[in-house]
Amino acid sequence: MSSFRELLVPGLAEVGRGQRGRALEAAVRAAIRDGRLPQGTRLPSTRDLAVQLGLSRGTVSSVYAQLVAEGYLRAKHGSGTTVATTPASSEAASPPPVKTQTRWRYDLRPGVPALSAFPRSEWQAAMRAGLATLTDDDLGYPDPAGLPALRTELAAYLGRARAVEAADVVVTHGVAESQSLMAQILRADGHRTIAVEDPTHPGSAEALAAHGLRPVPVPVDEDGMRVDLLPRTGCRAVLVTSAHQFPLGVVLSPQRRRALVSWARERDGYVLEDDYDAEHRYDRPAVGTTQVLDRDRVVYLGSVSKVLAPAIRLGWMVVPAALRDRVVDHKRLSDLGCSPMPQAALAHLLRTGGYDRHLRRSRQLYRRRRDALLAAVAGELPDWQPHGVAAGLHLVLRLPEGTDDRALQVELARRGINAPALSGYALSTSPFPGLVLGYAATSVDRLRAAVAEIASVSAL
């Protein structure tokens, strides 16, 4: 079978004698996968192939045996060895192509901190220090509520920085998991809908819907969510970003906060308060939380994603006492709890002030970048007006009336600029045409260059 020999010899010639068995195995496997050895093809006997390739018969027999075990070949007494019909040899079983992220020239999506400014050396030191504090028992299955040392530090930090009464902290893998856990509990209690701000983060609405809660949009104006419209929704739960609404960047007014809590009390409901990037306020101290008004009706959600990095996958819930055991049990059934090692590292950063120091550095960096973006927009696009308070990691730009922000987003994407349209965050009708531009992860010079290109596109 000279054709078979020609198929395999080139690969064998390139390896040492001791590696030829593995090389033959890989060559046959590859030939079956790409169709050069189609289904039903009869292979030479082990003796014949060994002679053709200059290998020992034992080597060839081992290769055949391995490929039979993997399902590539079929060996039947009296019928020889043939290429089998298996998922491994079918086109349908080929692994799907790996999806790669678009390589944007300017990536201005919101919600991404300055990952290049992540305090790597401090985190490495915190990981070592945290690991040293863990006992042998701590390396077993973790407490699903979270490492006690981290819960203690979080309670102190949240009380000091956000005035949160944090007696019942549960550590999670971020706000996304916290929302999912609460959605499961609400669904079990008979909830089928949940009120959400409109516009809102599409990921939040998607996660809630995935757990059986239909998001009901409630408009947002200059004072935050229209709480007066909540009774019309028929909901008994609501998700809000009261300190810095995403994406519009407004703050829920004190009057509406009180009305929100009253609404929850009257309906025996709950407020899920996502403290979205509230730590980053540039013109005054961050606004306090709604949770302080009623810790029995407000579930407070937060994470390190906007301060340190999303990849750490740590967040927290401050839950009403009546819900704590159920939340912890759902967490246990979900994933048995978060890894103690990053929890110990975060506890160390909080205890030693490293978290606060990084937050102060980040706040200064983001303010410079925000100011640079505003100055560039004022110079290049004077008709585009910023919306919302001076806070967070992104800026909403209100475009002239009549602008099609989605069409503009598409055209900018063609130029390699990721600048999401405000209408893409609306569940019903967008309040105005706009772009939602993240600035935290982009340098001052690149922000200026991006705005110049955006201006050139908008002028077309």
Image: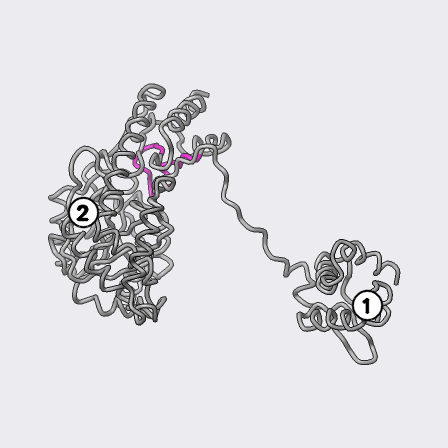
Residue position for label 1:
43
> Percent x, y for residue 439?
34, 34
Residue position for label 2:
227
Magenta stretch in the rendered image:
418-435
Residue type for callout 2: Val
**Res 138 → quadrant:** bottom left
Is 448 covered by the magenta stretch? Answer: no
Marks 1 and 2, the one that precedes in the sequence: 1
Q: Is residue 183 left or right of residue 458?
A: left
Q: Is residue 126 left or right of residue 36?
A: left
Q: In this view, does 429 lie to the left or right of 326?
A: right
Secondary structure character of the magenta stretch overall: loop
Q: The residue tagged with tag 2: helix, strand or loop? A: helix
In the figure, 122 relative to 140: above or below? above
In the figure, 192 relative to 231: above or below? below
- State which quarter of the image contains the N terminus: bottom right
